Image (cartoon, coloured by chain):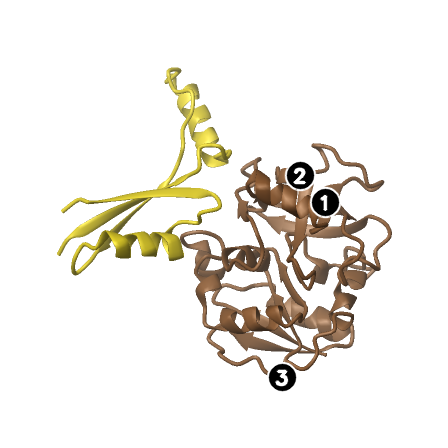
Chain colours: A brown, B yellow
Amino acid sequence: MKIAVLRFPGSNCDQDALHALRTLGYRADYAWHEATDLSGFDGVFLPGGFTYGDYLRCGAIASRSPVMAEVRRLAERGAPVLGVCNGFQVLCEAGLLPGALMQNASQKFICRPVWLSPVNRTSPWTHGLDRPIRIPIAHGEGRYTCDEATLRALQDEDRIAFRYTDSSGHRSADANPNGSADDIAGVLNAGGNVLGMMPHPERAINPLLAGDDGVGLLRAFGLVRAGSV
Amino acid sequence: MPIVRVAVTLKPSLLDSAGRTVAGSLDKLGFHEVSSARIGKLIHLEVDRFDPERIKEMCEKLLANPVIEDYSFEVVE
């Protein structure tokens, strides 16, 4: 399993992502946004940051980068693709995930640990998680938004990966940091191999630093059967 | 060369948190007649020729996100 950590102009969580993946025993390397060939990689991590200064819309310009054709190819083959924070925004802008991320309802940039409850229990990303996990968020534009038909489809098809909850798994307005629709913190594509989420699992891999609840989630990279890609 | 003005606005059903803050600030300044403010983007495109189909394509491929935004455009010069 070799994972590409994508780097766009303005990515800033790329080093954390590479460090986390290597710490967990994966082979991982950076891939530049102009790359046109990701053969040799079995999975993709789209890290957080402010690609292209968030010009036009968060993730809009990055999602039109050459490398995204390769991300799409890998995603269609069932390879694990994880977009975190700005990476989630890029996946939505690219149409690989439904919906969009808008400015937090509070208007504030929020940087603190939050509790997430796995909703879907069958995807590689979530099936090993049997309790709420504590993962940091750091974003100004993380309010998940989609139309009602899309929301119903996400619910009916079990494609909500995580909801913001309290530590006991209960939902409330207080537990939802950014005003996301249906308390959504992360969503899956139809195949379950592409996950986008605002919280940063790569920042939660060490019990001494914000906990290690991100480990179980990142282990999914080794569980998705990517085949030969 | 013609200049096309593209206006991109959030869909009316969506919360515009920045607009809400601006409306609140106007209210604090004494402009109590303002009940809401919506913030959008204006993009001026200088083009070789005006082709509405091409502008529409630009809006749908990049300038607006159909999930959250509406757009309109007109030639201004």
| Residue plotted at (67% across, 82% down) | A228
Residue situated in front as seen by the camera: A21 or A117: A117
For the residues tagged 1 and 2, is the chain the same? yes
Distance between the alpha carbons at the discs numbered 2 and 3:
38 Å
| Residue plotted at (18% across, 54% down) | B50
Disc 2 element = helix
| Residue plotted at (52% across, 81% down) | A37
Asked whether, in this view, residue A110 is left or right of residue A57, the answer is right
Which comes before the other along the chain, label 2 or label 3?
3
For the residues tagged 2 and 3, is the chain the same? yes
Disc 1 element = strand
Asked whether, in this view, residue B34 is left or right of residue A38, the answer is left
For the residues tagged 3 and 1, is the chain the same? yes
Q: Residue A72 carries which label?
A: none
Pointers 1 and 2 in contact (C-beta within 8 Å): yes
Q: Residue A163 carries which label?
A: 1
Q: Which mark is residue A40?
A: 3
Return the chain for callout 1: A
Q: Is residue A183 at least partly visible in the picture?
A: yes
Image coordinates for residue A220, horizontal then vertical, percent? 76, 66
Q: Is residue A111 at least partly visible in the picture?
A: no
Asked whether, in this view, residue A42 is left or right of residue A115, the answer is left
Callout 1 amino acid: Arg
The number of discs equals: 3
Return the chain for callout 3: A
Query: What residue did someone put label 2 on?
Result: A182
Q: How crowded is mark 1: few (under 14 residues within 10 Å), some or many (20 or more)?
A: many
Image coordinates for residue B8, horizontal then vertical, percent? 36, 43
